Image: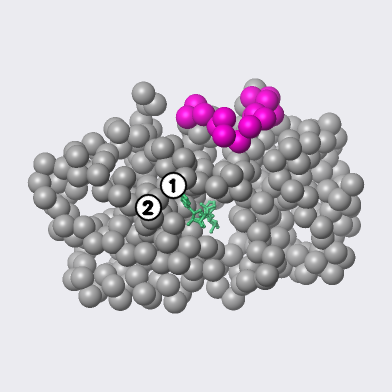
Amino acid sequence: MLKAIENNNYSIYFKSEGYKKLAHYIQGKKINKILILTDDNTKNFCLEQFRNDLLSYCKENIFIHDFSIKSGEASKNFSESTKIIKYMLQCGFKRNGLVINLGGGMISDIGGFVASIYMRGLKFINIPTTLLAMVDASIGGKNGIDFNSIKNLIGTFNFADFTIVDSRFLKTLSKKQLISGFAEIIKHSLISSNNEWKIIQEIDDINAISDEIIYNSVIIKNHIINKDPYEKNIRKYLNYGHTLGHAIESYFLNKKEEILHGEAISVGLILETYISHVVLKLDINYALEVKKLIFKFFKKIEFTDNNINKIVNLLKHDKKNKSETPLFVLIEDIGKPVINQKVSNKNILDAFKFYAV
Ligand SMILES: NC(=O)c1ccc[n+]([C@@H]2O[C@H](COP(=O)([O-])OP(=O)(O)OC[C@H]3O[C@@H](n4cnc5c(N)ncnc54)[C@H](O)[C@@H]3O)[C@@H](O)[C@H]2O)c1
């Protein structure tokens, strides 16, 4: 059995232990209403399994509402948030209601956001159903929605009371989505240790991602969040690959050729590892290793000069910036991230050239 991770702010449970804890929690907190938030796919593929697992541990009858929004990043917005709030109001949710976010990062981000602002805050719990949400989005208290084509512009820091990681949900997830989640596992290994990086490089088959790999990735993120929950310093390590990754993702938001979060981050990881070589003298072989591993799983994206200029322009919206100059997290060695690094436009353009060849 995977050992539970219990912190002051929040806990992470795995598989059946999670459902037992959840049933106990609901009864102990005298929750009077539950909203399970899903999207089209998690309503189809995950809702029934989750209800059955939960109800098999609940001693009393509990009344559960569920509400579903359209799947996809385009739903992470104010208009969908308003629909959820209206539904909760209609069902009579008060502050002793509970929101359960059953889905990927889109659902935990918007559901955590709504739960944080409805009546100044309801309790919420995350049940991640994608690889990306299991190792990343469902942990760490960041919630939010996109606005004006800027990723996560509006949001809150507010922790889910707990997260249940149950890899059985991955059975129905597409290969493309599994690969997208793998980008965050790669990132965690790069900011963690050489040993972790070696283990991850040996993965050849995305379907062979084991519970142990997921668990180790969760441990890496959790360790950092615990030390710096509100991103004053070392939590910024988790933004490795994300400064350019988010700008790329923002650029493709609402475009015909929309790309997945992890796909954008995979590009960001190659670019920022190359920039780490230029700025912090990271051994170039690591940049080559990152590129090799990422191209084993991810398709190369063709960027025109015009695309790149627009992406560079979007960097000024990065939330890590103190002014309009983008600040990067780079690595001076595997497992040794360095925050608040200024990077020139030339370094960025050179990194795109490194990506392209
Ligand atoms: N808050 C954070 O700390 C944090 C961290 C990383 C990413 N994020 C956010 O997470 C989002 C990306 O998350 P994601 O990749 O999970 O995307 P997602 O939630 O959009 O899910 C991806 C797709 O998989 C489908 N799906 C989900 N679970 C499924 C299942 N078990 N079977 C079949 N289909 C399923 C969804 O309906 C969707 O179509 C982005 O909005 C990103 O900004 C947040």
Outermost residue on the left side: it is 60
Estimate how packed mark 2 is, as few (under 14), some (14 to 19) or many (20 or more) residues with alpha carbons within 10 Å: many
Q: Estimate the x, y position of residue 152 in percent, counting from the top left.
A: 54, 64
Q: Which three-letter amino acid code belongs to the residue tagged 1?
A: Thr
Seen in the picture, residue 301 relative to 277 is either above or below; the reply is: below
Magenta span of residues: 198-212
Residue beneath disc 2: 102
Residue beneath disc 1: 129
Q: Estimate the x, y position of residue 354 in percent, counting from the top left.
A: 87, 47
Is 64 colored magenta in this rendering? no
Q: Is residue 158 visible?
A: no
- Drawn side of residue 116 relative to residue 243, left or right: left
Q: Main secondary structure of the magenta part?
A: helix
Q: Which three-letter amino acid code belongs to the residue tagged 2?
A: Leu
Which quadrant is home to the N terminus?
top left
Q: Residue at x 59, y 65 (%)?
A: 151
- Drawn side of residue 236 relative to residue 330, left or right: left
Q: Residue at x 81, y 63 (%)?
A: 308
Dot 1 beta carbon under 8 Å from ligand 1:
yes
Q: Secondary structure at mark 1?
A: loop
Question: Do the residues bearing badges 1 and 2 touch, measured as CB atoms within 8 Å?
Answer: yes
